[in-house]
Image: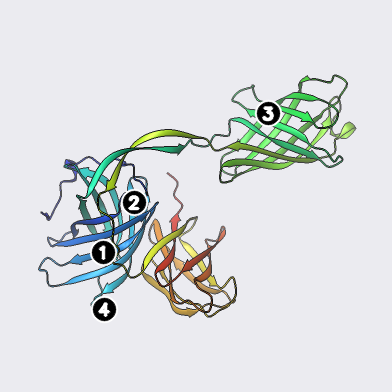
Amino acid sequence: MLHRSFSFAYFFLFTVGLNAQGLTGLWEGSLYQEGKTDTFYYRLQLEQEGDDLSGNSFSRSPDGQSTAEFSFTGVVDDDKVVIQEIIQMAPEAPKWCLKYMLLRIGTNNGKVVLEGDWKADGCTPGKVYLENGDFTTKEITIEEEIPFSILGKWTGHLSQSDREYGFYYEINLQEGDESESYIVSEGNGGSAYHELDWEYDEITGNLDLEEAMVKIKTDDKWKWCIKSGSLSLRREPHTYVLEGEWKGFIEGFNFTTGSCAPGKFYLEKPIETRTITKAVQEARKPYESKNERKIKVQRILEVQSPKLKIKTWDNGTVDGDIVTLFLNGNLLFEKYRVAKTKYTKLVTLKEENNFLILHAESLGDIPPNTVAVSIDDGVKEQVIILSSNLEESGAVMIKQFKVN
């Protein structure tokens, strides 16, 4: 039974472990507006693929005389669900509110629920409460990534500009005075340990290294370079990489009296995981999509400013692609024939999470419809490639940067 108001303190919200189809299914409940007593019936026919959500929503007025159906897109973010209705599919008129919803995942009397706030341009905001009774709980074992730490052992190699052979090189970063580097020559010299000072900037991802002195070496006659340099951090599919240039001087000298030929660092550290067991909410019934066109979030971007410059162009062969672009359901441009010339639109974001949707009107001569889109926030320009066809529209989620 649907109720006009809800006592949200009566059920416990928690983070549920969700598999790739965890929220797929039919969600039914109520929607109401602040300061109004009318309660609307509201329904989501939802499909989940990873963290991406898509499907249709349906709303009915309290007297049952008026209904509307929408296409929506969204994402799962920890224990929250972000949904944006993009297009009113029926009726053609009058126009209903295109709702932006931020819903929490929880339980109520053994049922999984979605509950939270909604708002829309020009509409009084309100609350949403939805239930799904088609779920069962089971335990699954998954690999969870361990949070990144700069500390620990990094291994790789370094090169030097005045010789053809290289050196095996590793660093062991520790708190206090325990850090050291280790080097092995592929030519003469053997190996050596150096005392190491370092400083890491979490914001820029830069690591500054400076070898203080040679601690241990296998060849007492060999003079090693005392090296220093700056390395930048990046992430690869299965490893973190530190890479940069170094300069140095021969032990017993300084940069003026005995500088070394410079070179480059390359160091790796594997992305570590741990095996954990989670309780998973799994749908009993498969989802059967009634949506004529699904909306799939293909990228998630973060921007520093709500004021954006959005550019669109054909990054490949100009073959007659025709597209329509939406931002949170609002039309940016309609049935635009994509060309090499960049089409520019200035927008201001109103939400924390925003959805840019590419809707293919024509696939041109070379399907699918592929368009380059750049998002420029005045600090950085980010370029993405969106792909759409007549069954699926590509989307990008744009998150406004927040300092917690």
Residue for point 52% across, 70% down? 371
Disc nearer the start of the sequence (4/2)? 2
Q: Which quadrant would the N terminus be assigned to in this image?
A: bottom left
Residue 30 x/y as whole percent: 17, 57
Residue tagged 2: 21
Name the mark on residue 197. 3
Identified by mark 3, the residue type is: Asp
Residue 353 x/y as whole percent: 39, 57
- Residue 97 in view: no
Q: Nearer the viewer, residue 249 or 324?
A: 324
Q: Is 311 situated left or right of 281 in this image?
A: right
Q: Marks 3/4: CA distance?
A: 68 Å
Identified by mark 2, the residue type is: Gln
> Count the marks: how many?
4
Disc nearer the start of the sequence (1/3)? 1
Residue tagged 4: 92
Q: Is 288 situated left or right of 248 in this image?
A: left
Identified by mark 1, the residue type is: Ser
SS under mark 2: loop
Q: Nearer the viewer, residue 364 or 324?
A: 364
Disc nearer the start of the sequence (3/2)? 2
